[in-house]
Amino acid sequence: MRDLMRSLSVAFVLGLFVASPVSAAENSKQHRVAMHVDQNDPDVMNLALNNAKNVIEHYQSRGEDVVIEIVAYSGGLHMLRSDTSQVKDRIKEMVGKYSTKIKFAACNNTIQGMEKREGHAISIIPEAFIVSAGVVELVDLQEQGWSYIRP
Protein backbone atom coordinates (compact mmCIF):
# COMPACT_ATOMS: atom_id res chain seq x y z
CA MET A 1 0.00 0.00 0.00
CA ARG A 2 2.83 2.34 0.87
CA ASP A 3 4.47 1.75 -2.56
CA LEU A 4 1.15 2.40 -4.29
CA MET A 5 0.75 5.74 -2.48
CA ARG A 6 4.31 6.72 -3.32
CA SER A 7 3.76 5.83 -6.99
CA LEU A 8 0.52 7.81 -7.12
CA SER A 9 2.20 10.82 -5.49
CA VAL A 10 5.05 10.75 -8.00
CA ALA A 11 2.59 10.37 -10.88
CA PHE A 12 0.55 13.31 -9.59
CA VAL A 13 3.58 15.60 -9.30
CA LEU A 14 4.82 14.61 -12.75
CA GLY A 15 1.33 15.20 -14.12
CA LEU A 16 1.41 18.76 -12.86
CA PHE A 17 4.51 19.45 -14.94
CA VAL A 18 3.13 17.78 -18.06
CA ALA A 19 -0.29 19.40 -17.77
CA SER A 20 0.95 22.95 -17.28
CA PRO A 21 -0.31 24.96 -20.27
CA VAL A 22 2.86 26.95 -20.96
CA SER A 23 6.28 26.01 -19.75
CA ALA A 24 8.91 28.64 -18.99
CA ALA A 25 10.92 27.55 -22.04
CA GLU A 26 7.96 28.06 -24.39
CA ASN A 27 7.11 31.43 -22.88
CA SER A 28 10.64 32.75 -23.35
CA LYS A 29 11.06 31.60 -26.97
CA GLN A 30 12.34 34.26 -29.31
CA HIS A 31 11.21 34.06 -32.92
CA ARG A 32 13.99 34.96 -35.36
CA VAL A 33 13.20 35.74 -38.98
CA ALA A 34 15.64 36.46 -41.82
CA MET A 35 14.31 38.13 -44.98
CA HIS A 36 16.15 39.11 -48.09
CA VAL A 37 15.65 41.73 -50.74
CA ASP A 38 17.71 41.39 -53.92
CA GLN A 39 15.67 43.49 -56.37
CA ASN A 40 15.63 47.23 -56.99
CA ASP A 41 11.85 47.18 -56.91
CA PRO A 42 9.91 49.39 -54.47
CA ASP A 43 7.02 46.89 -54.50
CA VAL A 44 9.32 44.10 -53.27
CA MET A 45 10.90 46.41 -50.70
CA ASN A 46 7.49 47.48 -49.38
CA LEU A 47 6.32 43.86 -49.33
CA ALA A 48 9.32 42.95 -47.15
CA LEU A 49 8.54 45.86 -44.81
CA ASN A 50 4.84 44.89 -44.71
CA ASN A 51 5.76 41.28 -43.91
CA ALA A 52 8.13 42.42 -41.16
CA LYS A 53 5.51 44.72 -39.62
CA ASN A 54 2.85 41.99 -39.70
CA VAL A 55 5.16 39.40 -38.12
CA ILE A 56 6.26 41.81 -35.37
CA GLU A 57 2.70 42.85 -34.55
CA HIS A 58 1.46 39.25 -34.57
CA TYR A 59 4.02 38.07 -32.04
CA GLN A 60 3.68 41.23 -29.93
CA SER A 61 -0.08 40.61 -29.68
CA ARG A 62 0.71 37.17 -28.23
CA GLY A 63 3.30 38.56 -25.81
CA GLU A 64 6.11 36.79 -27.65
CA ASP A 65 9.49 38.18 -28.66
CA VAL A 66 10.62 38.42 -32.28
CA VAL A 67 13.65 39.77 -34.14
CA ILE A 68 13.70 40.31 -37.90
CA GLU A 69 16.78 40.94 -40.01
CA ILE A 70 16.26 42.15 -43.57
CA VAL A 71 19.36 41.50 -45.68
CA ALA A 72 19.75 43.59 -48.84
CA TYR A 73 22.15 42.70 -51.64
CA SER A 74 22.41 42.97 -55.43
CA GLY A 75 19.73 45.39 -56.71
CA GLY A 76 18.03 45.22 -53.33
CA LEU A 77 20.85 47.28 -51.83
CA HIS A 78 19.05 50.36 -53.19
CA MET A 79 16.61 49.79 -50.31
CA LEU A 80 19.39 50.83 -47.90
CA ARG A 81 21.24 53.42 -49.98
CA SER A 82 21.04 56.99 -48.73
CA ASP A 83 20.85 58.39 -52.25
CA THR A 84 18.45 55.97 -53.99
CA SER A 85 16.20 54.37 -51.38
CA GLN A 86 12.52 54.91 -52.04
CA VAL A 87 11.65 53.41 -48.64
CA LYS A 88 14.19 55.07 -46.33
CA ASP A 89 11.54 57.17 -44.55
CA ARG A 90 9.48 54.07 -43.88
CA ILE A 91 12.56 52.21 -42.60
CA LYS A 92 13.36 55.12 -40.26
CA GLU A 93 9.78 55.05 -38.97
CA MET A 94 9.84 51.27 -38.43
CA VAL A 95 13.18 51.36 -36.61
CA GLY A 96 11.78 54.15 -34.42
CA LYS A 97 8.72 52.07 -33.58
CA TYR A 98 10.29 48.58 -33.42
CA SER A 99 13.91 49.42 -32.56
CA THR A 100 14.80 46.13 -30.88
CA LYS A 101 12.71 44.02 -33.24
CA ILE A 102 14.06 44.87 -36.71
CA LYS A 103 17.53 45.17 -38.23
CA PHE A 104 18.74 45.94 -41.75
CA ALA A 105 21.94 44.44 -43.18
CA ALA A 106 23.69 45.79 -46.29
CA CYS A 107 25.99 43.57 -48.35
CA ASN A 108 29.53 44.94 -48.57
CA ASN A 109 30.27 42.92 -51.73
CA THR A 110 27.39 44.73 -53.44
CA ILE A 111 28.50 48.09 -52.05
CA GLN A 112 32.02 47.59 -53.44
CA GLY A 113 30.68 46.49 -56.82
CA MET A 114 28.39 49.51 -57.07
CA GLU A 115 31.20 51.85 -56.03
CA LYS A 116 33.41 50.43 -58.75
CA ARG A 117 30.70 50.72 -61.43
CA GLU A 118 29.47 54.16 -60.38
CA GLY A 119 32.88 55.64 -59.56
CA HIS A 120 31.93 57.08 -56.15
CA ALA A 121 31.41 56.02 -52.54
CA ILE A 122 28.05 54.50 -51.68
CA SER A 123 26.40 55.77 -48.50
CA ILE A 124 24.10 53.51 -46.52
CA ILE A 125 21.23 54.81 -44.35
CA PRO A 126 22.10 55.07 -40.64
CA GLU A 127 19.48 52.45 -39.70
CA ALA A 128 21.48 49.74 -41.52
CA PHE A 129 24.73 47.96 -40.75
CA ILE A 130 27.18 46.40 -43.20
CA VAL A 131 27.92 42.68 -43.47
CA SER A 132 30.72 41.23 -45.58
CA ALA A 133 28.39 39.26 -47.87
CA GLY A 134 24.60 39.28 -47.87
CA VAL A 135 24.23 35.69 -49.04
CA VAL A 136 26.66 34.47 -46.38
CA GLU A 137 24.72 36.45 -43.74
CA LEU A 138 21.54 34.60 -44.75
CA VAL A 139 23.32 31.24 -44.63
CA ASP A 140 24.76 32.02 -41.19
CA LEU A 141 21.37 33.12 -39.83
CA GLN A 142 19.67 29.98 -41.14
CA GLU A 143 22.38 27.78 -39.66
CA GLN A 144 21.69 29.50 -36.31
CA GLY A 145 18.03 28.48 -36.57
CA TRP A 146 16.50 31.63 -38.04
CA SER A 147 13.39 31.18 -40.21
CA TYR A 148 13.87 32.35 -43.79
CA ILE A 149 11.31 34.40 -45.73
CA ARG A 150 11.63 35.71 -49.26
CA PRO A 151 9.03 38.38 -50.03
Image (spheres, rainbow, N blue to C red):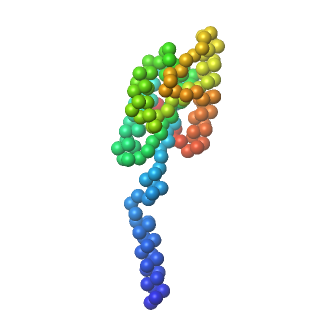
In depth, the one of 97 and 146 nearer the eye is 97
Q: Residue at x 43, y 84 (%)?
A: 5
- Most extreme residue toward the left is 61
Q: Quadrant of residue 144?
A: top right
Percent of width and height locating residue 98: 41, 34
Percent of width and height locating residue 27: 43, 53
Percent of width and height locating residue 72: 54, 26
Q: Residue at x 57, y 39 (%)?
A: 141
Q: Residue at x 44, y 18 (%)?
A: 86
Quarter containing the N terminus: bottom left
In depth, the one of 52 and 120 nearer the eye is 120
Regarding residue 46, the answer to whether it shows in the image is no
Q: Quadrant of residue 130?
A: top right
Q: Is residue 3 above or below residue 148?
A: below
Regarding residue 10, the answer to whether it shows in the image is yes
In depth, the one of 142 and 128 nearer the eye is 128
The number of numbered discs placed on residues in the rendered structure image is 0
Q: Is residue 112 left or right of residue 67?
A: right
Q: Residue at x 57, y 22 (%)?
A: 74
Q: Is residue 47 left or right of residue 126?
A: left
Q: Quadrant of residue 14?
A: bottom left
- Most extreme residue toward the top is 119
